[in-house]
Image (spheres, rainbow, N blue to C red):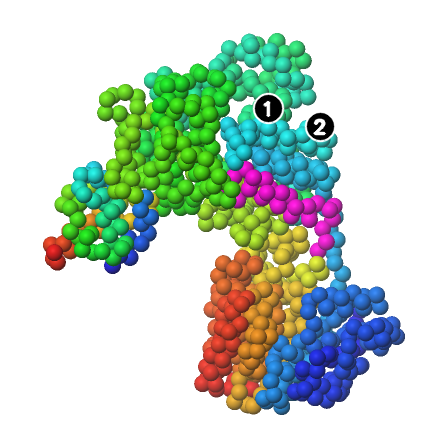
Amino acid sequence: MIANETAPCVQCGYCSAYCEVGFLAADTPRKVLRYLQRDDLQKAATSSFLMLCKQCQTCGLICPQGVDVAGIMRRLVRNRFLHY
Amino acid sequence: MEKRIPKIGVYICDPGGKVGKVIDLQILAEKCGKTKGVEHSEVIADPWSEEFLSGVREKIGAGEIDRIIWGGRFTVRQQEILKEKLTEATLNPYLHEWCDLELHGVGQNTEGTNVQQKKALSLVKMAIARAKHLQPLEPLDIPATDAAVIVGAGIAGLHVAASFLERGKPVHLVEQQSGVGGKVALLSRFYPLNCDPHCGLEYVLKSLRGSDKLTLHTLSKPTAIEGAAGNFLVTLQTEPRYVDENRCNGCGLCTEVCPVDLPVYTDNVQDEPPFQWENGIGSMIRDTRKAIHPSLPYAFPESYVVDRQACPEGCAKCRDICPTQAIELDQVPSERNLKAGAVVATTGWDPYPLSKMSAYFGYGSYPNVIGNLEMEQLLSRMSRGIDNLSAPPVKDLKTVGFVQCVGSRNKQHLSYCSSICCSATIKQIQQLKSIQPEVTCVVYYQDMRCIGFEEDMYQAVKKSEDILFVRGFPQITGSESGSSQLLAVAEDTFSGKPVKKDLDLLVLAGGMQLSQAGQDFAEVSGLPLNENNFLTGHYQCYPEESQRSGILSGGCARGPMNVSQSIDSANRAALKALNFLDGSISIQPTYPLVDKTKCDECKRCVEECPFACYHYDEKGFPEPDLGKCRQCGNCMGTCPVAAISLNNFTIKQLAAQIEVLENSFLDYEEPVILAFLCENDAYLAARAAVDSGLNPPLNAIYVKVPCAGAVNNAVVADALALGIDGILIAGCSDGQCHYVNGNQLVLKRSGDLREKLTTMMIEPERVRSESVEIQESTRFVEILEDYIKDLKELGPNPFKI
């Protein structure tokens, strides 16, 4: 389900640049979406970026493809606590 | 209309002998010969032999036959040739009827030869019935004007004008600004040769300067476009120039005494008023001009123009000093009507307002964030050594950033790619580096779309170490040190690491949208814009067309494109427009006629015509404007009282064919289907089905229609009442109908049809509509087989004898 939502992502990097904490973890938010595009749910759900995301929603608002980036992050966090 | 007793000649041709192997053509010819109205019937070997043709001419000359049915397979070209050869014998080309046996599966295989024989007879009898109702027809010549009106005098419009003038056509070139040139005149260079646009503009103006066939209407806009191709009436509203164009020689003495200094705005035309910086006006460029100035954006016409609203009360210094008394400060707006055979819209583009992107890049918050049009103006001044610019002074530029795709490829702004910005940015970088070789440039991009030979430009800049490409978009904030620099932080999406740069100037490669003038034109002409809000026809094949015949579009009015593409597209529009500039318009005689004795003025034809070509006569009856009519037949299809017919495709002719259709060529339980196939798609699919050996079932009889929307419910109901088991209406798929929406109109009327059939105690399932595309021959056969199966379950039509 999350995989379908990342399909429109063109990896432009707007989300990373406008994210308040975009460069503070090992992964940028764009990279996390890339893990999902490559079907690597483990890497995405265990990314250290998820701990920094404060759901400010800037990423989703700025995304030119209309991807709900913050929503994906939120569900990944839940996924991590359930499975990893 | 003279009462003729038709004398039909039937010629059955089977040169390859394919059909003759399966059915007995002689018997067919004999049975036809016995039909009332048929004076002559024979099987012939070669319709092209001079012997045969002169024999036919003799018969026509002697009055033995006055119309011909050709049974057999003829290409469209062959049909035209036969018609031509017999026109010499005074047989009107509309008195031929074509009956294609092979299309209907006759001769396709050796099964069911009995059925094929009977079907062949049924088909020829239908052709005979229709032939009795054929009328001689002549094309109509409507006198027209050979003048053209071009709206928009940018590069595209200028090239269209030049093309028309080369052909000796009078041209009215309409421009809303005081001078020609449009956006190209605002550029510093254009790619890929990095030419100065003034050179290109001057060159095309050569054909326009001094031409006595060109009338240039500046400061003008069309406020109405009435009429049809060949005979348009365009109303122009013209604002006053306050200078007599015939007297002004551009000497410029007036500017020396004008007391007013106006800032030169180069910013986005559709944007909000410029922002206020500390010195007043928001723009990096501090150029000013006087209230009286040469035409803008380019000094053609050469006459000056006054920005009257900026004049101080009572000031007339310019008028007093003018050596040729050219200045007329009390001019008023005027209106005029122009006659035109064709109208070409070359209204160009406007920048997508960058103020809508202010959240992204601080446009409007920082004076050194500018758009790409403004960068052109900056470069133009820098290249000419002009230096009256504010902080940061451009001679101190160390690092300049360029952001691509600003506003484009964005679901919240412009969803499409604006085509030119990647190459335009590289062009700007090349010019910047030639003026200031030490400057560093950073390009923030997602994809670099330098198409075709523009790739060479990309390779050229990639060689430089001072030109960096970062794949990622930056967040822009004020500098951390408090200087006027900008801090740009982007993710380098290749490495996942942040890239920080301090920029002296940031150039946003903004998007292109239809200009305000283009939107106004669409409103005035009643033309719809496409889903990207541009003025264009069928994008791939006929981009210059519009729903009003004779109104065409060219250049960026159609979509984002570069200068050479604009010129190409302008010339295409000009070529197509020339068809309407012959001084007369020839109308094919197959236009619709309204039977005013039947019409009850329900207005349905007026509403449903895809080209809005109906108006009302003095008595309130609908009448088509033949210059606008595309002869699709949708009016005929929609009329609830079947009062409209196309010449040569009339309700009477259809009714006659259906009346003699004999169900008995098949067994009683085997359904007979009457299929109306649209000539652009479904009919060709049916033909392909037979030609590619798919052996479609023999149950269907095909009637070719100009559009699925031309099928009238009355004809359908009639056919079912006479015992035909099923009706199939096959047209184009959505978005592909050659007449905009004929296929949808069929569905719209199906509600009425169901009602009608239910009151006649006929199952509505006996009517089916399908979309069939031109190559879908296999699917066409499946549709038939499916329908046959369903009709068998339904059982034979209770009205079937």
| Residue B562 seen by the camera | yes
At x 49%, y 24%, the residue is: B380
Q: Residues within 10 Å of mark 2 (few under 14, many from 20)?
A: few
Quadrant occupied by the N terminus of chain B: bottom right
- Residue at numbered disc 2: B210
Q: Secondary structure at mark 1?
A: loop
Quadrant occupied by the C terminus of chain B: bottom right
Question: Which disc number belongs to residue B299?
Answer: 1
At x 78%, y 65%, the residue is: B84
- Amino acid type of the residue tagged 2 in the rendering: Gly
Chain letter of disc 1 in the image: B
Chain letter of disc 2 in the image: B
Residue B155 sits inside the magenta stretch: no
Residue B583 sits inside the magenta stretch: yes
At x 50%, y 17%, the residue is: B289
Q: Is residue B642 above or below residue A74?
A: below
Q: Which residues are magenta?
A: B558-587
In front of the other: B780 or B258: B780
B36 left or right, relative to B559: right
Q: Residue B576: x and y, percent?
A: 65, 48
Q: Residues within 10 Å of mark 1 (few under 14, many from 20)?
A: some
- Measured Cα–Cα span from mark 2 to mark 1: 15 Å
Q: Earlier in the sequence, mark 2 or mark 1?
A: 2
At x 39%, y 37%, the residue is: B404
Q: Is residue B530 above or below residue B161?
A: below
Q: Secondary structure at mark 2?
A: loop
In front of the other: B133 or B481: B481
